[in-house]
Image (spheres, grey):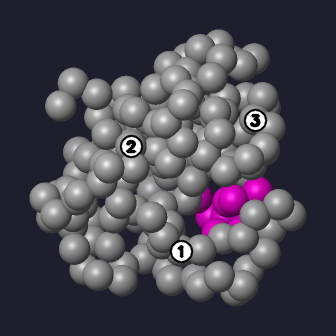
């Protein structure tokens, strides 16, 4: 199962954050990608740096014949089309697309390099982010973290984060 995290908190060429995430989901439906299922869009507080607007987040389950590094390059191209400019860590962004899990593969830092980012699988911060865990629990309740064997629902129960990334209204 391939899981992609989506987030936006800044307007760009595709519109506001909600429109941008919706358009990104549509982009995940274009070959060589196939959107299998998408979570509900949620509004969340910023993670890491709190002095910015809330995010619109979602998780998508996709299928593709692309290898992980090729998929990362395809996701970076979608981000670029949405107006993404890579600045400082945890800064506002028009679109952020992360590979959360790629069929349970484990890839450590330094194992593969793309043109602008190192790929680590599964995403190293899944267990810390409510805005990732809740959507995974929604669309893939039987998914288990490749390293811990825990489901997203189980990780949500033990989540204790004051770093942000909380779903608003909870």
- Residue placed furthest toward the top: 15
Which of discs 3 and 2 lies nearer the camera? The answer is 2
Instruction: State whether residue 112 is above or below residue 138.
Output: below
**Residue 166 relative to residue 98: left or right:** left
Q: Quadrant of residue 41?
A: top left
In terms of secondary structure, where does tag 2 sit?
loop
Mark 3: few/some/many CA within 10 Å (<14, 14-19, 20+): many
Q: CA distance from mark 3 to mark 1?
A: 22 Å
Q: Would residue 2 be seen by someone viewing this image from the given angle? A: no
Q: Is 162 or 131 nearer to us in this picture?
A: 162
Whichever of callouts 1 and 2 sits on the residue coming sooner in the sequence is 1
Q: Would you name the residue on which mark 3 appears?
A: 84
Q: Would you name the residue on which mark 1 appears?
A: 121
Residue at 75% over, 64% down: 117
- The range drawn in magenta is 64-73
Instruction: State whether residue 116 is above or below residue 120.
Output: above
């Amino acid at each position: 199962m391939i899981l992609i995290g989506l987030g936006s908190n800044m307007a760009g060429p595709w519109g506001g954050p909600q429109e941008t995430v919706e358009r990104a989901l549509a982009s995940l439906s274009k070959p060589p990608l196939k959107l299998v299922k998408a979570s509900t869009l949620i509004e969340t507080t910023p993670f890491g740096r709190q002095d910015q607007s809330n995010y619109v987040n979602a998780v998508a389950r996709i299928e593709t014949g692309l290898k992980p590094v090729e998929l990362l390059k395809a996701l970076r191209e979608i981000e670029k089309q949405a107006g993404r400019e890579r600045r400082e860590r945890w800064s506002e962004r028009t679109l952020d697309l992360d590979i959360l899990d790629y069929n349970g593969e484990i890839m450590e830092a330094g194992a593969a390099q793309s043109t602008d980012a190192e790929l680590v699988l599964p995403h190293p911060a899944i267990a810390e982010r409510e805005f990732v865990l809740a959507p995974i629990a929604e669309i893939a309740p039987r998914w288990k973290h490749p390293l811990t064997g825990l489901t997203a629902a189980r990780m949500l129960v033990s989540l204790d984060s004051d770093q942000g990334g909380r779903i608003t209204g909870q």
